[in-house]
Amino acid sequence: MTVEYEQIKEKFLSGKPDGCETFFEKNGFYTEAGYCYIILDELEKARDMFNRALISDIRAHWGLILLQMLGGKVTLNPTYFEIRNFLELDLSIFIRYYKAGYINEILKFADFMAYYNPECYKYIGRVFWANNFIPAAMFFLRKAKDKYYNDPELHYLIAYIAYHNDNDLKQSEKSLKTCLEILPKYAPAEALLRVIKNKS
């Protein structure tokens, strides 16, 4: 069962949903089935799956919040860890399945999520960066700086994008120095700073 589960999960995550919901629902993986139904635009079936999973799977609570965001009204409160653990993955899944409408609905709740986890803008920016939507990534990373400036990883990511995507050595170096002021000896920042200094 474990091997088959992993194969079906990988199939779903790689953008091939056909039949995945049937396997998951039949075998009691209700949270996974809920995600399949979201992709298939069957949100009431997704809600039913998450409600069934609620007593045995902590991810189901986040699934219900996700459905509320897609519906435009949230009455449940997310936890810090739910946002940290699931937001990036969900946005990546929706990007893979070309669900721009769903992404837009979720992003309307970015300020709401930031109340519970101030790093949420960074997570959103990181997803857009990983999927090569650089202007959108930078928009959310700048918002992240306004909300949670003392995050060394945030400044490193901005430096990385400035260096690799924009070839902007000056901006990259500036962001790396900020990163290292916040967290001295942050190894990735030190390594990239050495590369930049060797080019100067």
Image: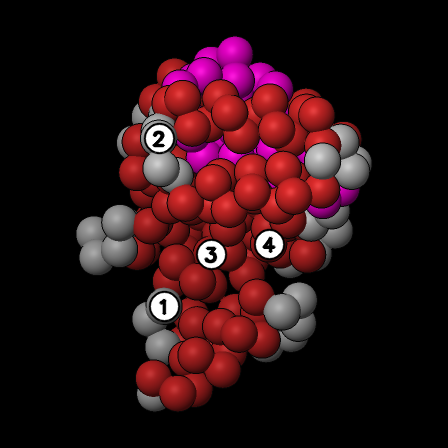
The Cα atoms of the two marked residues, 1 and 2, are separated by: 44 Å
Q: Main secondary structure of the magenta part?
A: helix
The answer to which of marks 4 and 2 sits earlier in the sequence is: 4
Q: Return the residue nearer the eye: 7 or 148.
A: 148
Crowding around mark 4 (Cα neighbors within 10 Å: few <14, some 14 to 19, many 20+) is: some
Q: Magenta span covers which residues?
A: 140-165
Residue for badge 3: 34
Q: Position of residue 195 (x, y in %)?
A: 62, 45
Tell me which label, 1 or 3, sits earlier in the chain: 1
Q: Position of residue 87 (x, y in %)?
A: 47, 41
Query: Disc 1 or disc 2, which is closer to the eye?
Result: 2
Give residue 196's quadrant in the image: top right
Identify the residue under disc 2.
184
Q: Amino acid at mark 3?
A: Gly
Q: Which residue is mark 1?
A: 29
Q: Quadrant of the N terminus?
A: bottom left
C-alpha separation, residue under disc 1 versus residue under disc 3: 9 Å
Q: Residue at x 56, y 42 (%)?
A: 194
Residue type pointed to by label 1: Phe
How much space separates mark 4 and mark 1, taking CA atoms?
Answer: 18 Å
Residue 124 included in the magenta stretch of the image: no
Depth check: 138 or 185 in front? 185
Instruction: Say which of 127 and 13 sits in front.
Output: 127
Residue behind mark 4: 93
The location of residue 15, given as percent across then percent down, is 66, 67
Q: Earlier in the sequence, mark 2 or mark 3?
A: 3
Callout 4 amino acid: Ile
Q: Does the CB distance between marks 4 and 3 fall below 8 Å?
A: no
